[in-house]
């Protein structure tokens, strides 16, 4: 059976499989970020209080930023997405992309003392973030708070990128497997020049 793939860039079948894997994993990560955006939007709409509790809001926004940034963050395998995936068609989408990456790096995945400051709270002092006083000395770790309303532009960027990644993944699938006589069962992707 001939597994030759004609490509403009003369990439081997093994390299194209690696590309497919990277695209598919990126597509999955962005789908998770998009689903988290949908959930945050639903929470905001249905929330009865004046504001979301700060820890809940940060946890939700962190999940979006971490899933979103995964394909753009160094890893041994399959590697980061090529630069073309970091470019968006509008300034709003581009800004949302850059903001999610920056939030992942500076707020959620790393601790920088310039960003993550700490306050000591003497006994009986009301700390605004917590809204009450403790009977003993306490502390609060502070960082930037991402307004949950940012999810609107983040969601648009996720949907845009996911749509492009999915299209590229299916195009790569067609390139690799579209003309082959495939077995009538699922089979694992192997990083070789064969099926």
Image (tube, grey):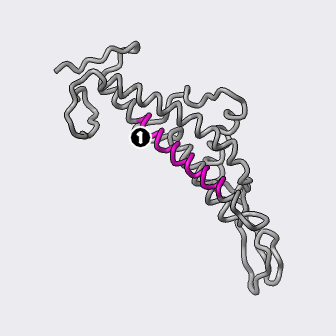
Relative to 9, does residue 35 appear above or below in the rendering? below
Is 30 drawn above or below residue 8 in the view shown? Answer: below
Q: Residue at x 40, y 30 (%)?
A: 19
Give whichever of 103, 174 is nearer the camera: 174
Residue assigned mark 1: 76
Where residue 91 appears, x then y in whole percent? 72, 30
- Viewer-nearest residue: 22 or 45: 45
Residue 67's place in the image compared with 167, above or below, is below
Task: Please give left or right for residue 135 compared with residue 100 in the image.
Answer: right
Query: Quarter of the image holding residue 124?
Result: bottom right
Q: Position of residue 186 (x, y in %)?
A: 25, 40
- From what the image shows, is residue 117 above or below residue 151? below
Q: Is residue 41 magenta?
A: yes
Q: Which of the 4 quarters of the picture holds residue 94?
A: top right
Residue 187 part of the magenta-drawn span: no
- The segment highlighted magenta reads 22-42
27 on left or right of 97: left
**Secondary structure under the numbered disc 1 in the rendered image:** loop
Classify the position of the C terminus by image quarter: top left
Residue plotted at (74% across, 67% down)? 48
State the image coordinates of residue 156 (x, y, percent, origin top left). Answer: 64, 39
């Amino acid at each position: 059976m001939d597994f030759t793939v004609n490509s403009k860039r003369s990439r081997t079948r093994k390299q194209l499989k690696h590309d497919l894997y990277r695209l598919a994993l990126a597509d999955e990560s962005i789908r998770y970020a998009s689903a988290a955006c949908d959930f945050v939007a639903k929470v905001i709409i249905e929330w009865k209080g004046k504001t979301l509790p700060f820890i809940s809001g940060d946890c939700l926004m962190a999940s979006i930023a971490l899933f979103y940034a995964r394909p753009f963050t160094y890893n041994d395998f399959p590697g980061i997405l090529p630069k073309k995936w970091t470019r968006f068609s509008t300034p709003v989408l581009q800004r949302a992309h850059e903001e999610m990456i920056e939030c992942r790096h500076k707020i959620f995945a790393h601790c920088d003392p310039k960003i993550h400051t700490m306050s000591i709270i003497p006994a009986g002092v009301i700390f605004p973030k917590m809204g009450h006083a403790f009977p003993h000395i306490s502390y609060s770790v502070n960082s930037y708070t991402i307004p949950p309303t940012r999810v609107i532009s983040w969601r648009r960027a996720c949907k845009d990128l996911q749509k492009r990644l999915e299209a590229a993944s299916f195009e790569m699938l067609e390139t690799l497997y579209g003309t082959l006589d495939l077995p009538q069962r699922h089979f694992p992707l192997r990083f070789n020049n064969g099926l």
